[in-house]
Image (spheres, grey):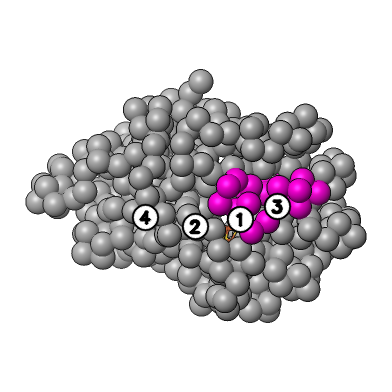
Amino acid sequence: MSRSRKILRTKLETSPTARVTFMSSFLNLLKEQGVDVDDDATIADFGLHLDLTDGKRWFNGSAASSAIITITE
Amino acid sequence: MSEFDDLREWSDVQEKDVLVLNTTMTCPLSCDFCCYGCNPKRKEKMPLAEALRLIDQVAELDCFSSIGFTGGEPLYYLDEFLKMTDRAALHAIPYTVATSGFWGADSAQAKITAAHLKATGLRRLNISCDPSHAEFVTPEAVSTAAKLVAATGIPVYIVGTFTNPEDTLKNFVPDLTEVNNVHLVDKIVAKVGRATKWDVNYGAAATDKVKTCYRRVYHDLVVFWDGKTYPCCSTFNRATPGLVVGNAFEEGLSAIRTRVEASLLFRVIKREGFPELYKIIKRLDPELFARMPKFDEYPGACSACNAIFKKDDIAQRVYKVFDLYRTQEILKSMDKVDQILGKENAAAFFENMLVECS
Ligand code: SF4
Ligand code: SF4
């Protein structure tokens, strides 16, 4: 295991801020390594609910922001 | 019809994040089912400088596509509302407004208001109209406001909230049924705020219930007059203290937004829904699972969410479980990165990530 990976792992285990950063940087950094982050199946393999999070299909179903509607149930 | 078809009709625009400013609890009305208990005597109001600062922040952030103004009655303090919408226009940020349409009672002033809304980038006007609102604002005033705005080409949604699924706006405001750009949407009262103890018939909604947040991607970040910020515009937000995601008067919108987006709890309830949330909690904290309000006992995702997150001890423990869950999932994803990217690319990935996280 590389040194960076080890340090990163410890940071992630101990720091909530690092976990937030990890989540928000994950896709961009994968992209930098040549991963097609627009492909549902590819990103699903990485876990983290990414298939459900960032897949294009969600945009079709819920394009509308329903800001300020009455959600009542 | 799928469970979200009724939400899709709300816009033909691909919205990203929306900043919703709940600028005041003051309202000329006192509807019997008001979720926030608003009335003319309530004085809470967002300081104008804070509202303008938030609008400026939206302009700086790529993830936001519009602003929503709500309340109380966002047009009650008209001068300030005009300044806020002028500021949105300055940045070319479109906005939506939820109003009671009380300003339609004075048709000369309503004409001026409609022209301002059009000129400053109103994208959609939502007007509440039903028997409860009609105690204070006549359907004629609503009709005037709706027609003036619709005539400028802006879509107007009339929202009727009823206690019975058989009551409809078609019957309540028949003269608005055939007006160009005016759409009628019927809803059922939420058992929250003044209507907490009401006997409400949810009809088909009770069997075909929604299990997820109403937005599956992106967020409606709602900032109230006191800066408290919520992850959604659900009627239940303010009654659910455990949903507070920060205070936008004390920290930047960007930081709050990043936290919400990075939360596996929100990811799970937005995409997979409450059954998955319960499954995760049952696995990681069976004792908490046993104490939690049960999803089956509530008519939908938001009322169940309210039941879970309004109790501080349960809310904090759910957050704790999901922080543990996130840590476990992150560590698993690191192994996946190793496997999928191969040694060299994975090493570069971890190095870059370490820089980001330092
Ligand atoms: S118009 Fe809206 S904010 Fe005002 S009292 Fe009625 S429900 Fe509440
Ligand atoms: S389920 Fe909870 S977080 Fe999601 S929209 Fe409803 S109240 Fe908001």
Give amino acid for label 1.
Glu
Q: Dot 3: few (<14), some (14–19), or many (≥20) neighbours within 10 Å?
A: some
Label 1 CB-ligand 1 distance < 8 A: no
Name the front one of labels 4 and 2: 2
Chain containing mark 3: B
Label 4 CB-ligand 1 distance < 8 A: no
Please check whether the numbered discs 3 and 2 fall on a single chain.
Answer: yes
- Magenta residues, as a range? B122-144
Give amino acid for label 4.
Thr
Instruction: Judge whether residue B7 can be spotted in this image.
Output: no
In this picture, residue B141 sits left or right of residue B312? right
Q: Which label is found at residue B138? A: 3
- Residue underneath mark 4: B196
- Look at 85% across and 48% down and name the residue there: B148
Residue B206, quarter of picture: top left
Please check whether the numbered discs 1 and 4 fall on a single chain.
Answer: yes
Give the percent coordinates (x, y) of residue B159: 61, 43
Where disc 4 sits, the SS reads: loop
Q: Quadrant of the C terminus of chain B?
A: bottom left
- Residue underneath mark 1: B135
Chain containing mark 1: B
Foreground: B154 or B87? B154
Name the front one of labels 4 and 3: 3
Name the front one of labels 1 and 4: 1
Image quadrant of ligand 1 equals: bottom right
Chain containing mark 4: B
- Residue underneath mark 2: B32
Give amino acid for label 3.
Thr
Please check whether the numbered discs 1 and 2 fall on a single chain.
Answer: yes
Q: How far apart are marks 4 and 2 (CA)?
A: 11 Å
Give amino acid for label 2.
Asp
